[in-house]
């Protein structure tokens, strides 16, 4: 091998990912006094978090004082169909308000209530108005606020230590391809600068993964090119485990026309603010799709639903605000029944329900987005929408309190979309932004104290670095393989067609064999051109991550013989209490994905006591119900 | 359903490059970024281009399309004629890295130099109270997606690398304005900072930045002009300064925005601050009372004041850098005519007899 230049850096904590979770983790690690690096795949401040529109859920009770963490916890568990890691849902519900308020001290400007507090809006699955928001660009506000907080920390360091980058540095347009271990301990991370193609090695005892999701493996997705499952794959290769990979959230309302923006989201607030879904017959069809578990909370007539917007205390919610998976499935059924739009979606109509002026005021970026991207005026005509791959509930299996990855690896932490468990089988809108903050802070803090507790820094081995260099350069040195773009399209076709929103056993088996073929082809991928800012090469390196994560999803989807949240099996349409007790855990054995069953942690008595028996009976097994009754009896005595 | 269209795309790196011609298939409803992706997937897999959200929200895919700075994800192909060749070049203001990707680190350096939000010391998290109407002004600027098109189009740095040191650009003027208008920001010198450290005075309000802003932020009208009005006029324009000396309206002219920049001439003028004026409107109560007694032929007239010149002995203002189209009012911007009668110093010869 020819001599390869590798830039070396030493840090205490390396945070991979510069979205909401990554930045919050980095802030925490830096506040704990650790020398911290942030690795950003794009430019600083461009992370996919900017796309979040609706808001950040936190039970602050500013709009309805009856809201509390208990209610938020209950909504989260209900949304996740009780498959959530209860402890994560609990921490999330308890700590979100603090994390939101903290953002104000960093300079965030949320929309206000009349008495000057942070305004909160209604959102699918949330019992009370709960989402702190800034118009419909809450994600941008969040990322900019965290970005500016990091700048302010750098200014402190400049003042105290004479260097902006003394204790926290952002490596923008840098991709990590490999984690390096010393035994089972994390010793560092290896990657390349996108701009120059030069290699870089970070030696660090603690690594926080905050790389987001996996959506680029799907044809129709709201996710950006960065979402190639890097963190998922890095964790697997380092000896970590993934859970719940079968659960992918398809956002019910993505744009389906024009083709150039297929997949881009139409925020749920359009429905929260009065928008309704109609099929090609002009029928408001969601009333036909309210499942039994939700029957009590949702309106049965259009009149009642319409009254709810003005008087939510005395009316039940419109069914357009059902959890995302329900809405996505309903739209899918309407389209399959031939009542869809020409482009294969349904109509989302707000034009006939609100004045043009009000629509422009309440949904400014939606209005502009449609006007400029599609030349559609949402104040005059309905939008054409359909399900788009939006979020992966599954991810790195972590300790709920610290974010430390399970499996054999030590010194690895994960937060945000890349971690699994918090959202169970389906995430509620608005829970993601607060998830980033709550668990970002936790992971950053625990990574810092883990680094503190080490007697000696783990050492990076030369051979591991050499192997990483070789793997990274391989696609450039081959000229016989296929184009990475073709392979990505093929992968997207397999995942979109066979492991999509509605799944069947035969198709999943087919998907497994196609993924195995793709694995062979991806191993031989070749990229034309040089190392300097070469997107073909970058994609070639991302492909193997996308592939292994797709294998986990397909394998887990085949294994789970029920329908729950973001996993719908046509051949097993019902929810099965027995399956609620099981997490499917993926790990790597050599190159192969191995799947195991693992029982869910059992909810503490005071938490399960927050639910009605009638509601629990839809989710729990008979034995679990008997146990619940015994508890209730004991509490009654 | 697609048609073939002609594209000219700049290919190269920091050592040079040129425009290359491509014929690409374009389908209905596509944007320029789709075409670039199609090129990557077919003939030019290594064509470098930044992008992320493809929905006009992240500000990554900035480039110049037919010479106009645009987000390529927001530039619909339907805005071009079918037979029109679409020319795509990298942002001109920043050094090229490769193809359509430029080194925008200038912007991150300027961001780092701009003082951050200063939280109020007496408020704990959760105690912040602000009215919607008060946060809205700053919220407009917080819509910024940092596409840097405003920075790219700004003439102060577009072809003038030498100005980059002293000039932060429109993106960071709106950041200063945002913090200036933040209801709870504890720092009070945002405007003065913009003037003294960010080079606000370089801006000659051609509004190009506003024109290219994909978020439609009124950069010039709502951020730059309000800040200039309160700082720049008084500082740079000797006539405005003199006028405001004569017609003071209770506001001390802000002659010394930063200690290092105030000129000697200005201080010399300030020494005569208490002098009563012919035209009235003085806030010196005693002089005003005297004036009411009748015409006082021994009244002191203002001393001639030297212009506020800069270190080189020249007026710091030239027609080119002035922010107004026409000549300024010799009486100062804050004086409007006719003057209110109560501010006129006119004593009728018989007024004493009437008393």
Image (cartoon, coloured by chain):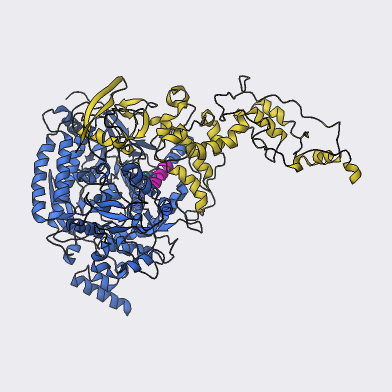
Answer whether residue A444 is magenta in the image: no
Q: Colour of chain A?
A: blue
Q: Can the viewer see residue B347?
A: yes
Vertical placement of residue A549 versus B206, above or below: below
Q: Can the viewer see residue B114?
A: no
Answer whether residue A144 is magenta in the image: yes
Question: Residue A304 lies in what quarter of the image?
Answer: bottom left
Q: Nearer the viewer, residue B224 or A441?
A: B224
Residue B110: horizontal and vertical position, in percent?
45, 33
Quadrant position of the N terminus of chain B in the picture: top left
In this figure, what is the number of numbered marks? 0
Left or right relative to A44: residue A625: left
> Which chain is yellow in the rendering?
B
Magenta residues?
A: A140-149
Residue A83: horizontal and vertical position, in percent?
23, 61
Can you name the residue that lies furthest to the bottom here?
Answer: A637
Q: Nearer the viewer, residue A235 or A620?
A: A620
What residue do we see at 61% from left, 19% from top? B312
Residue B303: horizontal and vertical position, in percent?
76, 27
What residue do we see at 20% from left, 42% from top? A183
Vertical placement of residue B157 versus A16, above or below: above
Most common SS among magenta residues: helix
């Amino acid at each position: 091998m020819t001599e390869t230049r590798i830039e070396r850096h030493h840090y205490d904590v390396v945070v991979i990912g510069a979205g909401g979770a990554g930045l919050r983790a980095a802030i925490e690690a830096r506040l704990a006094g650790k020398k911290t690096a942030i690795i950003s795949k794009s430019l600083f401040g461009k992370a996919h978090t900017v796309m979040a529109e609706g808001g950040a859920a936190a039970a602050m009770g500013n709009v309805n004082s009856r809201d509390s963490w208990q209610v938020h916890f209950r909504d989260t568990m209900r949304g996740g169909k009780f498959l959530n890691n209860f402890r994560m849902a609990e921490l999330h519900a308890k700590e979100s308000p603090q994390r939101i308020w903290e953002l104000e001290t960093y300079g965030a400007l949320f929309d206000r209530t009349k008495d000057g507090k942070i305004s909160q809006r209604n959102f699918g699955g949330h019992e009370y108005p709960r989402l702190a928001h800034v118009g419909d660009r809450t994600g941008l506000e969040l990322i900019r606020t965290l970005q500016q907080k990091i700048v302010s920390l750098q200014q402190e360091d400049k003042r105290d230590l004479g260097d902006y980058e003394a204790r926290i540095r952002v490596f923008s347009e840098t991709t990590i391809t490999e984690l390096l271990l010393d035994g089972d301990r994390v010793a560092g991370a290896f990657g390349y600068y996108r701009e120059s193609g030069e290699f870089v090695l970070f030696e660090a005892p603690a690594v926080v993964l905050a790389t987001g999701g996996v959506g680029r493996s799907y044809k129709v997705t709201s996710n950006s090119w960065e979402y190639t499952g890097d963190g998922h794959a890095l964790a697997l290769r380092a000896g970590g485990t993934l859970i719940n990979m079968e659960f992918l959230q398809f956002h019910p309302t993505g744009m389906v026309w024009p083709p150039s923006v297929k997949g881009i989201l139409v925020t749920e607030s359009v429905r929260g603010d009065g928008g309704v879904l109609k099929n090609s017959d002009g029928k408001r069809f969601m009333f036909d799709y309210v499942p039994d578990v939700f029957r009590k909370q949702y309106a049965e007539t259009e009149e009642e639903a319409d009254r709810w917007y003005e008087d939510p205390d005395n009316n039940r919610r419109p069914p357009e605000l059902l959890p995302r998976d329900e809405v996505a499935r309903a739209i899918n059924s309407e389209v399959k029944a031939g009542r869809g739009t020409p482009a294969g979606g349904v109509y989302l109509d707000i034009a006939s329900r609100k004045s043009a002026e009000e629509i422009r005021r309440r949904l400014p970026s939606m209005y502009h987005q449609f006007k400029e991207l599609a030349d559609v005026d949402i104040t005059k005509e309905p939008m054409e929408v359909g399900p788009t791959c939006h979020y992966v509930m599954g991810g790195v299996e972590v300790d709920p309190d610290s974010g430390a990855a399970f499996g054999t690896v030590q010194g690895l932490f994960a937060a945000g979309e890349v971690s699994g468990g918090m959202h169970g089988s389906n995430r509620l809108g608005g829970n993601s932004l607060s998830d980033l903050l709550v668990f970002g802070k936790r992971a950053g803090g625990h990574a810092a104290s883990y680094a503190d507790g080490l007697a000696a820094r783990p050492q990076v081995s030369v051979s591991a670095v050499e192997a990483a260099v070789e793997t990274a350069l391989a696609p450039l040195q081959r000229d016989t393989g296929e184009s990475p773009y073709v392979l990505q399209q093929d992968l997207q076709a397999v995942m979109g067609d066979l492991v999509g929103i509605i799944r069947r056993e035969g198709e999943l088996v087919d998907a497994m064999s196609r993924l195995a073929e793709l694995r062979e082809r991806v191993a031989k991928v070749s990229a034309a051109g040089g190392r300097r800012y070469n997107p073909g090469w970058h994609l070639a390196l991302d492909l193997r991550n996308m592939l292994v994560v797709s294998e986990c999803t397909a394998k887990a989807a085949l294994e789970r013989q029920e329908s729950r949240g973001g996993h719908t099996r046509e051949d097993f349409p019902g929810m099965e209490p027995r399956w609620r007790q099981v997490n499917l855990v993926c790990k790597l054995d050599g190159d192969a994905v191995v799947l195991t069953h693992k029982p869910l942690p059992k909810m503490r008595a005071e938490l399960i006591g927050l639910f009605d028996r009638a509601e629990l009976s839809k989710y729990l097994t008979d034995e679990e119900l008997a146990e619940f009754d015994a508890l209730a009896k004991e509490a009654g005595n | 359903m697609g048609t073939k269209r002609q594209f000219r795309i700049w290919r190269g790196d920091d050592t040079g490059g040129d425009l290359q011609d491509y014929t690409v298939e374009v389908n209905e409803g596509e944007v320029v970024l789709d075409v670039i992706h199609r090129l990557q997937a077919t003939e030019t897999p290594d064509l470098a281009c930044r992008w992320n959200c493809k929905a006009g929200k992240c500000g990554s895919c900035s480039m110049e399309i037919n010479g106009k700075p645009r987000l390529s994800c927001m530039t619909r192909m339907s805005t071009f004629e079918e037979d029109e060749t679409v020319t795509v070049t990298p942002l001109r203001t920043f050094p090229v890295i490769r193809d359509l990707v430029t080194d925008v680190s200038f912007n991150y350096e300027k961001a780092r130099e701009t003082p951050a939000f200063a939280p109020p010391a007496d408020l704990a998290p959760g105690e912040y109270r602000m009215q919607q109407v008060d946060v809205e002004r700053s919220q407009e600027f917080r819509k910024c997606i940092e596409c840097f098109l405003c920075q790219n189009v700004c003439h102060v740095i577009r072809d003038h690398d030498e100005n980059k040191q002293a000039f932060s650009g429109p993106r960071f003027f709106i950041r200063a304005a945002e913090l200036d208008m933040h209801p709870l920001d504890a720092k009070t010198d945002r405007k003065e900072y913009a003037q003294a450290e960010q080079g606000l005075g370089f801006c000659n309000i051609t509004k190009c930045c506003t024109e290219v802003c994909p978020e439609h932020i009124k950069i010039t009208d709502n951020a730059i002009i309000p800040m200039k009005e309160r700082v720049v006029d008084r500082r740079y324009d000797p006539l405005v300064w003199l006028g405001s000396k004569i017609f003071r309206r209770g506001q001390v002219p802000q002659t010394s925005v930063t200690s290092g920049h105030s000129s000697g001439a200005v201080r010399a003028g300030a020494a005569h601050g208490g002098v009563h004026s012919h035209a009235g409107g003085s806030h010196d109560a005693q002089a005003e009372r005297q004036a009411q007694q009748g015409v006082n032929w021994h009244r002191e007239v203002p001393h001639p004041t030297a212009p506020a010149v800069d270190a080189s002995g020249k007026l710091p203002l030239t027609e080119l850098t002035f922010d107004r189209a026409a000549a300024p009012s010799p009486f100062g911007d804050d004086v409007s005519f006719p003057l209110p009668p109560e501010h006129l110093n006119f004593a009728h010869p018989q007024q004493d007899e009437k008393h």
